[in-house]
Image (cartoon, rainbow, N blue to C red):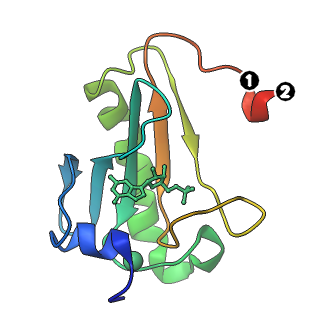
């Protein structure tokens, strides 16, 4: 996808602060952190949203979930963290290349959706 900012980050065409990379996935710090630790994990393959994930994507999406905890700990989330996947208009997704947010730090983040 030529127009996708996260495809460009995955291809190294736009710089990012990398947390982890392998042949299938990339983790990098969010440019506008919403918590002391805030990074994103993406498949290198362009998949627009979680709603577009199909059977063929199970291995790569599983890999993302499998590394999330290890990377969170490595980045300083020693007592838990939050994962968010914003999806589509209602989910207020900004970048249409599926990504999982990992948010954390030392202090509790507050309740979901500000309630
Ligand atoms: P969304 O609302 O789609 O779930 O989140 C997109 C996230 O991507 C936002 O938190 C935003 O700060 C982050 N982001 C947008 N553009 C860039 C970029 O060029 N580099 C990095 N590292 N993060 C970005
Ligand atoms: Zn993309």
Beta carbon of the mark 2 residue lies under 8 A of ligand 1: no
* Secondary structure of the residue carrying numbered label 1: loop
Q: Position of residue 51 (x, y in %)?
A: 66, 74
Residue drawn at point x = 53 percent, y = 77 percent: 48
Compare residues 74 and 5 and report the one nearer the observer. 5
Q: Residue 114: in sight, yes or no?
A: yes
Q: Nearer the viewer, residue 59 or 22?
A: 22
Task: From the top left corner, tell me how far across and down residue 81 is, in percent.
Answer: 51, 27
Q: Is residue 106 left or right of residue 27?
A: right
Q: Is residue 82 left or right of residue 59?
A: right
Can you say which quadrant of the picture contains the C terminus? Answer: top right
Q: Quadrant of residue 36?
A: top left
As drawn, the residue found furthest toward the front would be 32
Residue beneath disc 2 = 115
Q: Are marks 1 and 2 in contact (CB under 8 Å)?
A: yes
Residue denoted by label 1: 111
**Nearest the camera: 70 or 106?**
106
- The residue carrying pointer 1 sits among few (fewer than 14), some (14 to 19) or many (20 or more) residues within 10 Å by Cα, namely few
The residue drawn where x is 39% and y is 21% is: 77
Residue farthest to the top? Answer: 107
Mark 2: secondary structure? loop
Residue 83, image quadrant:
top right
Q: Quadrant of residue 91?
A: bottom right
């Amino acid at each position: 996808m030529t127009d996708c900012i996260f495809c460009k980050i995955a291809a190294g065409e736009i710089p990012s602060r990398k947390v982890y990379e392998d042949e299938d996935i990339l983790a990098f710090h969010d440019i506008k952190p919403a918590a002391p630790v805030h990074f994103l994990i993406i498949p290198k393959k362009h998949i627009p949203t979680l709603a577009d994930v199909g059977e063929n994507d199970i291995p790569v999406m599983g890999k993302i979930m499998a590394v999330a905890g290890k990377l969170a700990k490595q980045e300083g989330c020693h007592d838990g963290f939050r994962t968010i996947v914003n999806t589509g208009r209602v989910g207020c997704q900004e970048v249409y290349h599926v990504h999982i947010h990992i948010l954390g730090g030392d202090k509790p983040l507050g309740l979901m959706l500000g309630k």
